[in-house]
């Protein structure tokens, strides 16, 4: 197999032609879109636009076919057992809200426990909390070890308390650490819990195999998989989806409606109220088809090489305190410069056209546990180059010189 050619890969992203001077290292926030995705959305609106599932006319039937083909492509990418196990949402946040709300009205009773981890994104904390407080459900939290990994012994001890639900991220959006999800799912299942994986950062690292992983739910956003914003996926095993009370009511998700009662449509429609993001679904399927033309192992090896070079460069820069471990890291490095505020570092990087994110990265409980005000996050994608690494290191050195002068 020929080697990975990063320049050829990068050329497929018009964004970089419009911004040749920028180093974009904010990929954990959102990724750029290859032309194949932009084109698929454009063509949908130019050629195929109609509403889905409701038109008596042929145009609507064609739009419906495209939308349902997108669902099938995603189901097959995830190796879901059934196509209806893919529910379209607006993103990972919407999917996690649906799961938390949906289980709170069926599975969970006052006094029950759910288990989260210290490094979750707010999207995997707040939806649970909104309902737990109201329904008397208790949240337990898996702590971190001193090297900022999940404490797996504590995880097992907390599983012994019998949580009904265990929900954790595949990859930390702050630290980049890859969690041992297969082991964590197996342990949670042995403890009898429903398992939820926040795959927002994980899906671009590894093509998730639902039947092999055997989790109950896996969620992600299209925009972190080279796809459009405003579209995401809630994957659930059929038995798990049947546990969910719909969060949103409206058109499409019903069978019969009267002022006395409503009966619901079958899966997946029961959990997809209203007009969906049709072009987004088509765009996400295009992202997946496009991505499948590449060898993911090569993409990840390229990212790992960038990461190695970045760590190597950082080892020569004084005053840098790195929070992320280089081991089991998917391509995200969170760091601080002495006691400088992360936002000040990011401003100076921005002035040198290096795009990073600074702050608490929607993970305040993680930073509270680390007793830090935040961090500067450099997140790499397969379209980044060694030149991006070198320029970001130089810019960081410059920023440090200014801040510590
Ligand atoms: N979970 C994780 C780990 C994330 O990184 C993000 C996005 N930063 C989300 C959830 C939420 O994704 P979205 O905002 O696309 O719904």
Image (cartoon, rainbow, N blue to C red):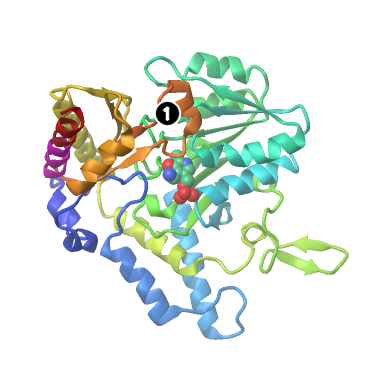
Q: Residue 402: percent from the left, percent from the top?
A: 16, 34
Q: From where the camera sits, is residue 81 visible?
A: no
Is the CB–ligand 1 distance for label 1 below 8 Å?
Answer: no
Numbered disc 1: secondary structure: loop
Q: Residue 14: percent from the left, percent from the top?
A: 22, 63
* Quadrant hosting residue 288: bottom left
Please give the residue where the numbered disc 1 appears in the rendered image. Answer: 179
Q: Specify whether 251 is left or right of 280.
A: right
Q: Residue 301: percent from the left, percent from the top?
A: 22, 37
Residue drawn at the location 68% of the way across and 69% of the way down? 251
Q: Nearer the viewer, residue 347 or 307?
A: 347
Q: Nearer the viewer, residue 160 or 176?
A: 176
Residue drawn at the location 77% of the way across and 33% of the way down? 109
User: What span is colored magenta in the figure?
Assistant: 387-395
Residue drawn at the location 43% of the way across and 22% of the way down? 370
Quarter of the image that includes the C terminus: top left
């Amino acid at each position: 197999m020929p080697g990975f050619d990063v320049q050829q890969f990068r050329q497929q992203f018009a964004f970089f032609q419009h911004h040749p001077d920028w180093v974009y290292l904010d990929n954990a926030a959102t990724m750029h879109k290859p032309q194949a995705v932009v084109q698929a959305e454009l063509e949908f609106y130019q050629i195929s636009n109609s509403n889905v599932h409701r038109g008596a006319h042929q145009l609507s039937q064609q739009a419906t076919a495209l939308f349902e083909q997108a669902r099938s492509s995603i189901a097959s990418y995830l190796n879901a057992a059934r196509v209806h196990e893919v529910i379209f949402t607006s993103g990972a946040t919407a999917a996690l809200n649906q799961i938390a709300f949906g289980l709170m009205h069926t599975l969970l009773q006052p006094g029950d426990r759910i288990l989260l981890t210290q490094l979750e994104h707010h999207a995997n904390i707040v939806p649970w909390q909104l309902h737990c407080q109201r329904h008397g459900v208790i949240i337990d939290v898996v702590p971190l070890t001193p090297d900022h990994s999940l404490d797996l012994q504590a995880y097992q001890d907390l599983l012994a308390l019998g949580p009904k639900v265990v929900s954790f991220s595949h990859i930390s959006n702050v630290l980049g650490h890859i969690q041992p999800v297969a082991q964590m799912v197996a342990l949670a299942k042995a403890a009898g819990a429903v398992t939820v994986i926040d795959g927002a950062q994980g899906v671009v690292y590894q093509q998730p195999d639902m039947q092999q992983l055997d989790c109950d739910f896996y969620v992600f956003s299209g925009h972190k998989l080279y796809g459009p914003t405003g579209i995401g996926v809630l994957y659930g095993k059929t038995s798990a989806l049947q546990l969910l009370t719909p969060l949103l009511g409206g058109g499409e998700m019903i069978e019969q409606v009267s002022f006395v009662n409503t009966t619901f449509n079958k899966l997946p429609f029961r959990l997809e109220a209203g007009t969906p993001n049709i072009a987004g679904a088509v765009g996400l399927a295009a992202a997946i088809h496009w991505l499948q033309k590449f060898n993911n192992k090569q993409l990840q090896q390229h990212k790992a090489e960038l990461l190695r070079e970045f760590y190597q460069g950082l080892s020569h820069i004084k005053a840098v305190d790195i929070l992320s471990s280089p081991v089991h890291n998917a391509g995200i490095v969170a760091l601080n410069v002495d006691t400088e505020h992360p936002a000040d570092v990011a401003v100076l990087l921005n002035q040198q056209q290096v795009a990073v994110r600074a702050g608490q990265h929607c993970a305040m409980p993680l930073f509270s546990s680390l007793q830090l005000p935040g961090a500067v996050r450099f997140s790499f994608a397969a379209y980044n180059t060694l030149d991006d690494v070198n320029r970001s290191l130089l810019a960081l050195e410059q920023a440090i010189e200014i801040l510590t002068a």
